[in-house]
Image (tube, helix red, strand yellow):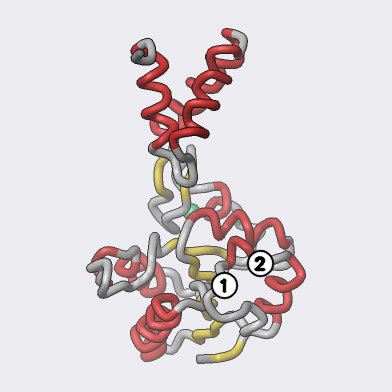
Amino acid sequence: MQYPEPIAKLIDSFMRLPGIGHKTAIRLAYFVVDMNKDDVAKFSSALKETKDKLMYCSICGNLTDEDPCVICRDKTRDQSTVLVVEQPRDIMVMEKMKDYHGLYHVLNGVLSPIEGKGPEDLNIKSLIKRLQSDEAIKEIIIATNATPEGEATAMYLSRLVKPAGIKVTRLAHGLSVGSDIEYADEMTLSRAVSGRTEM
Ligand SMILES: [Zn+2]
């Protein structure tokens, strides 16, 4: 027997999410069937708004519903430091730590020859343009993950930016090799930022 079409579609949609197998997708689909109409409406509009209202900040590349994003608009933040991260979600992690009050730049990935990702596929051009046009920026802190790709990206950026007379630092290796910023606890991150070393 086949699933009724709406349920089959729902199962198919859930299976597209990371970490969701067939059994879990079925369980979630039947859970939705049992949800009340209001909650389903809220859920579906949240999904839709994610695509309709979100954009990338034209300055830093962060995900935002207003351009420029709330961090780039905040003139009380330290305008001399830019922390460079791989993904928008890394900013959320850094902000939760509450010890960093500078600006950010999102690369949207790392250099990866295996995945065919070169410098032109990352937000590097916009970073260089930003450093050239904004004289207030004195230091960039590279906070790519401690993976081989993250390290290679940090080296690449350092070589690119240093000749312009901007200080380039790297998060201290409180983070173990191969670990992702998004899984680090606040204490470790805080120590990694304060103990950053010049490249
Ligand atoms: Zn921004």
Give the CA distance from mark 2 to mark 1. Answer: 8 Å
Could you tell me the amino acid type at mark 2? Ala
Residue beneath the point at 39% across and 29% down: 13
Is residue 30 or residue 104 the one in the foreground? 30
Q: Is residue 137 left or right of residue 113?
A: right
Q: Is residue 195 left or right of residue 149?
A: right
**Residue 184: which numbered mark, if any?**
2
Residue beneath the point at 73% across and 78% down: 191
The residue that disc 1 covers is 179
Image: 74 above or below 163: above
User: Helix, strand or loop at disc 1?
Assistant: loop
Crowding at dot 1, Cα within 10 Å, few <14 / some 14-19 / many 20+, comes out as few
Which quarter of the rendered picture does the N terminus lie within? top left
Q: Quadrant of residue 148?
A: bottom left
Q: Position of residue 36 (x, y in %)?
A: 61, 9
Q: How many marks?
A: 2
Q: Quadrant of residue 151?
A: bottom left
Residue beneath the point at 54% across and 84% down: 169
Could you tell me the amino acid type at mark 1? Ser
Residue lying farthest to the front in this orientation: 1
Q: Are marks 2 and 1 in contact (CB under 8 Å)?
A: yes
Is residue 132 or residue 197 the one in the foreground? 197
Of marks 2 and 1, which one's residue comes earlier in the chain? 1
User: Helix, strand or loop at disc 2?
Assistant: loop
Q: Position of residue 85 (x, y in %)?
A: 49, 66
Residue beneath the point at 38% across and 52% down: 58
Q: Is residue 103 left or right of residue 127?
A: right
Q: Position of residue 45 (x, y in %)?
A: 49, 21
Q: Is residue 99 left or right of residue 133?
A: right
**Residue 5: which numbered mark, if any?**
none
Residue lying farthest to the top in this orientation: 37
